[in-house]
Structures are given as C-alpha cells and as structure tokens.
Image (tube, helix red, strand yellow):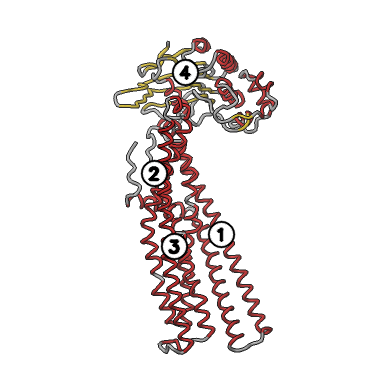
C-alpha cells in the first residue's frame, strides 16, 4: 500500500479542506438557502429591538397611552413571528443540507469500497470500516448544518447591526468594531489545538473500534489459548487512552467558550457604561450628548445581538475541528490506492463468446517472484461443472475471486459470458456462510427481496432443510443470529446455499462448499449441487472432496501457478 502521508501535515489538512469544499460546492443551493433564512431571522431580530425600544421610549419619556401603542405592539409580535419562522427554516434547511452532504460522502466511500473489492477490503477491520461509514460521516453534520452557514451569518448580521448602530451613535459603533475581532482571533488560536485533538480522537476511536470487534470475534480462540486477560488489559488501556483524548477535547471546547464569552461580556459592559454615563450627562465627547432613551436602549439591545452570531460561531467551531478530524480519516480511505488492474479486468470485450467463460493469459502475483497464477488461459462452457483441486495455497480461491470480480489480475483479461467480472449476476458460497440477524426468510430475501414464502420453503427443502423446517414452530420465520446460533455449521452453510436456489443464478461459484461439515451435511450439499448441475447451471467450485470431484464434468489441478487438467 502506498504511503498516504501524515494526516496532521499541512498538505493533508489542505486536502481535507479542499474535500470539504467540494462537498459544500455540490450542495451550494442548500447552504445559501440556510443563510438566507438566517438573514431573515436576523433582520426580524433587529426590527424586534427597534419596536421594543420605541415602545419603551414613547411610554416612559413621551407618556403615550398604551392604547396608542397598539400598532407598535402588533409590529413587535409580527417581528417575533417572522424571526421564529426564519429560525425554523434555517434549522430545517441546514439539516437537509447536512443530509445531502453525508449522502454524497457515503456514496464516495461506497464507490471506493466497490473499486477496492472485498478481498483487499477484507484486510481492514470491520470495526474500522463501520466507524468510518457511521461515526466519521455523521461527524460532518455539525460542520455543514451549523458551522458553515453560521460563518456567513456571523458576517452579514453583525454588519447590518453595525450600520444601524453607527447611524445612531458612531462612538458606540467604534466600540463594536474594536471588540469584534477579538472573538475570531481567540477562536482561531484555540481552534488550532482543537483540530489536532479531534484528529487524535478519531484515530483513537477507529483503532479502538477495530480492536474491540476483533477481540469479540476471536473470544473463543483467546479463551482456548488463555489470552483473555491480556486482551482485556489491552482494551482497558486503549479505552483509557480514548478517555484521556476525549477529556482533552472537551477541556479545550469549554475553555474556548469561556474565553469568548468573557470578551463578549466585557465589550457589552463597556458599551453599557458608555450609554449610561452618556444619558446621565457625565460624558460630553462626540455624539454622547445626542443620546436618547430610544437610541441608547436600542444600542444596548443590539449589542448582545451583534456578538451573538460570533458567539454561536465559536460554539460551533468544534464542529469544524471534528469535521477536519473525521474528514482526514475518510480522505485517507478514499486516497488509498486501488488495484490499477481492476479497470483492465473490468473491460468488456464485444468479440468474446456469450456462452463461455474466458481467461486470457491471466497472472496474479502476491509477492515478488512468487506467482500465484501465471499466464493462465481457460475456457469454460455454459452449463459445465468444473472442480478446482490442488494443494492448499495453490491458487484455487484466488481463481474463484478473479471470476467473481473480487480482485483483478496483474495481467490478462477475464470475461464471463462476454461481460466483465463483477457485472454479471452469480451465486457465491464462501468457506464460511454469510448470515444476518433475523429470520430464515430474512436471510434468503437478501438476494431476492420479493421472494414468496412458498419459494423460500422450496429452496430450503432443496438443500435438505425440510425436516428441520417442519420441526420449527415458526417455520421460515425461525430466528437465526449472524453467527448461526440455533443452527449447526452444516445447517448454516445449507441456509446460505438456499439463497442460490432462490435467486436462480446461471453461474455459481463455491469455495470449499463441504469444508468442515459432518457426513450428513456433506450428503445434503452434494445432492443440492447435483440438482443445480442437472438444471444446467454453470458450477465452478474448489474442493478436495472425492465425491464432489465425481460430480464435475472436468477437474482442473491448480498448482505452481498453473491450471491444467487433472
């Protein structure tokens, strides 16, 4: 694997920012709509303060009767209503923007997974992959739903307030201008440390997720070898390290909020002192002599609203740091080199025969000077039953993975009935059957979602699970766990094989279909494969089992990088 670089390096950080910008560019309409809704709410807030200050001034200074203030009260209520509507739309549009961005991010990850192939992808921990798909992508929500729109609102809304304050009193406006830069300045200084801590946070939890899942899956093996205490201690140390990183992140977040609140409070206090002394006549400099209850009160009401967008931005600044940390992990996955030969193997050849499977000079090398397959050419006719045999590590599974499109050859071409591997529907049964938590019917409907109960029942009986099905009160709705709990190993393998009958594939690939099975289960699997062969399906399977070899029309020996007739 090529070196992807340190995710904390400036070059990598620039790449992450560029990737986030590309995601934002594709959803620019939603972001702009969110900002417009926020601006409407901001203008309504300014109007609310104007009406409120005017009502108080008229009622206290001019002693206007309450009945004469009714129109202003109605305008105040209307401003409150528009403000609430604007904030509601802002929240809704921000959530929609985030949803679209996360969907785009997951689409990129899924596309990369497909390009990587299940064989190469299997080298990564399932816990790490799940964390990237769920946790890391969800960490982008705050950046696009809160921080990015707020960054624009923190410029537009304060500018509107600043213009009005300057019109009322230019000296108060100067106080706002001088104090406003302090918040972004300290926010940037604190944010530098927050970014690094968030990156460490996501790295740590990714490793912890993978290690914990690996330990749980291998719990039986750890118990057999007496290594449970060491595994427990490792998880404890990793968890404690994750706790320390999390507490550091929270400490920086709380500290930054406290610092920014302090500066905002001091600035508001200075303006309040100026307004108070100006109204009392203790300050005669500049426009202070022209201050009235209306202008002074309005400035005091607007001062917190001037700082509020900046304070909100500072509160959401950790969303930016979290997005950069999560984005670095996601981008590291997306920039992981994909097998450059996958495109070669995935190119259709219009001249290929549509009733045969062709391998043309296919070679695969895992290590230098060690060819797993070397210049293999092979033709399999439609409806043939091919058995692959040979020593362990000879390349049988590799050949099946090539046909399935799970990996690509280093050289040569493969065509399945004139189609590239991976684009042709086929049945697959690996050395370990794949099950999900749910019912038998749920597992069979993975490949055929619209299958009827009768079709599922028939498929189960075709693989010899009829007696077991009859003995279960729930029938096809009997529960099974992803590790096959409630079924023997042979029954779980046959449940996976039943999917192939249900889906009715023309090509079926099987990797050691009888490995690890008892004699009864072997008989049922043999009978099931015989039914598929009689039905005219193309079967290619690897095996050492003599009975399976007799089922084949042709037996191929895979050894020393060669594939030849046995």
Circle 2 sits on which residue? Answer: 332
Q: Can you tell which quarter of the image residue 214 is in? A: top left
Label 4, label 1: how far apart the Cα atoms are: 57 Å
Q: Can you tell which quarter of the image residue 468 is in? A: top right
Does the residue at mark 3 contact the one at mark 1 (Cβ under 8 Å)? no
Does the residue at mark 3 contact the one at mark 4 (Cβ under 8 Å)? no
Tag of residue 542: 4
Front residue of this view, candidates 81 and 256: 256
Earlier in the chain: of badge 3 and badge 4, it is: 3
Label 3, label 2: how far apart the Cα atoms are: 31 Å
CA neighbours of label 4 inside 10 A, class few (<14), some (14 to 19), many (20+):
many
Label 3, label 4: how far apart the Cα atoms are: 63 Å
Does the residue at mark 2 contact the one at mark 1 (Cβ under 8 Å)? no
Kindly state the secondary structure of the residue where label 1 is placed.
helix
Circle 3 sits on which residue? Answer: 257
Kindly state the secondary structure of the residue where label 4 is placed.
strand
Q: Nearer the viewer, mark 3 or mark 1?
A: 3
Question: Residue drawn at (59%, 82%), measured in percent from left and top?
Answer: 56
Circle 1 sits on which residue? Answer: 91
Earlier in the chain: of badge 2 and badge 1, it is: 1
């Amino acid at each position: 694997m090529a070196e992807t670089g340190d995710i904390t390096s400036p070059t990598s950080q620039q790449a992450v920012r560029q990737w986030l910008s590309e995601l934002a560019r594709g959803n620019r309409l939603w972001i702009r709509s969110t900002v417009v809704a926020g601006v409407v709410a901001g203008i309504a807030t300014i109007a609310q303060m104007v009406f409120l200050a005017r009502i108080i001034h008229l009622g206290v200074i001019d002693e206007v009767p309450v009945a004469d203030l009714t129109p202003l009260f109605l305008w105040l209520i209307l401003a409150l209503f528009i403000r609430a509507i604007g904030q509601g739309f802002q929240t809704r549009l921000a959530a929609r923007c985030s949803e679209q961005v996360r969907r785009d991010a997951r689409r990129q990850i899924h596309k990369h997974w497909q390009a990587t192939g299940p064989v190469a992808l299997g080298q990564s921990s399932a816990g790490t992959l799940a964390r990237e798909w769920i946790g890391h992508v969800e960490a982008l929500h705050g950046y696009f739903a809160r921080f990015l729109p707020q960054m624009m609102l923190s410029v537009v809304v304060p500018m509107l307030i600043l213009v009005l304050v300057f019109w009322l009193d230019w000296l108060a406006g100067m106080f706002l201008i001088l104090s406003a830069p302090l918040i972004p300045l300290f926010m940037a200084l604190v944010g530098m440390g927050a970014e690094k801590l968030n990156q460490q946070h996501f790295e740590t939890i990714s490793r912890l997720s993978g290690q914990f899942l690996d330990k749980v899956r291998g719990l039986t093996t750890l118990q057999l070898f007496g290594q449970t205490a060491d595994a427990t201690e490792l998880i404890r140390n990793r968890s404690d390290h994750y706790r320390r990183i999390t507490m550091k992140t929270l400490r920086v977040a709380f500290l930054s909020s406290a610092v920014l609140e302090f500066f905002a409070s001091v600035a508001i206090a200075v303006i309040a002192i100026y307004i108070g002394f100006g109204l009392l006549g203790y300050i005669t400099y500049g426009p202070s002599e022209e201050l009235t209850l209306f202008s002074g009160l309005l400035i005091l009401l607007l001062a917190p609203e001037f700082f509020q967008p900046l304070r909100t931005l500072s509160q959401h600044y950790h969303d930016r740091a979290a997005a950069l940390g999560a984005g670095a992990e996601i981008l590291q996955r997306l920039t992981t080199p994909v097998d450059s030969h996958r495109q070669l193997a995935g190119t259709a050849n219009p001249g290929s025969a549509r009733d045969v499977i062709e391998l043309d000079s296919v070679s695969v090398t895992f290590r230098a000077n060690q060819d797993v397959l070397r210049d293999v050419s092979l033709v399999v006719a439609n409806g043939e039953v091919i058995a692959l045999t040979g020593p362990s590590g000879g390349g049988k599974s590799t050949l099946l993975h090539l046909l399935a499109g799970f990996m690509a050859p280093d050289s040569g071409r493969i065509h399945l009935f004139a189609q590239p591997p991976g684009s042709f529907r086929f049945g697959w049964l690996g050395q370990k059957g794949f099950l999900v938590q749910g019912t038998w019917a749920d597992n069979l409907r993975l490949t055929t979602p619209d299958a009827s109960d009768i079709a599922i029942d028939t498929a189960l009986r075709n693989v010899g699970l009829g007696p077991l099905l009859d003995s279960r009160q729930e029938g096809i709705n009997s529960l099974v766990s992803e590790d096959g709990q409630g079924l023997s190993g042979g029954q779980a393998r046959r449940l996976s094989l039943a999917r192939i009958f249900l889906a009715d594939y023309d090509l079926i690939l099987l990797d050691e279909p009888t490995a690890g099975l008892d004699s009864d289960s072997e008989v049922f699997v043999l009978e099931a494969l015989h039914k598929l062969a009689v039905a005219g399906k193309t079967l290619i399977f690897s095996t050492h089992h003599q009975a399976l070899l007799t089922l084949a029309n042709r037996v191929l020996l895979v050894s020393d990088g060669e594939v030849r007739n046995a």
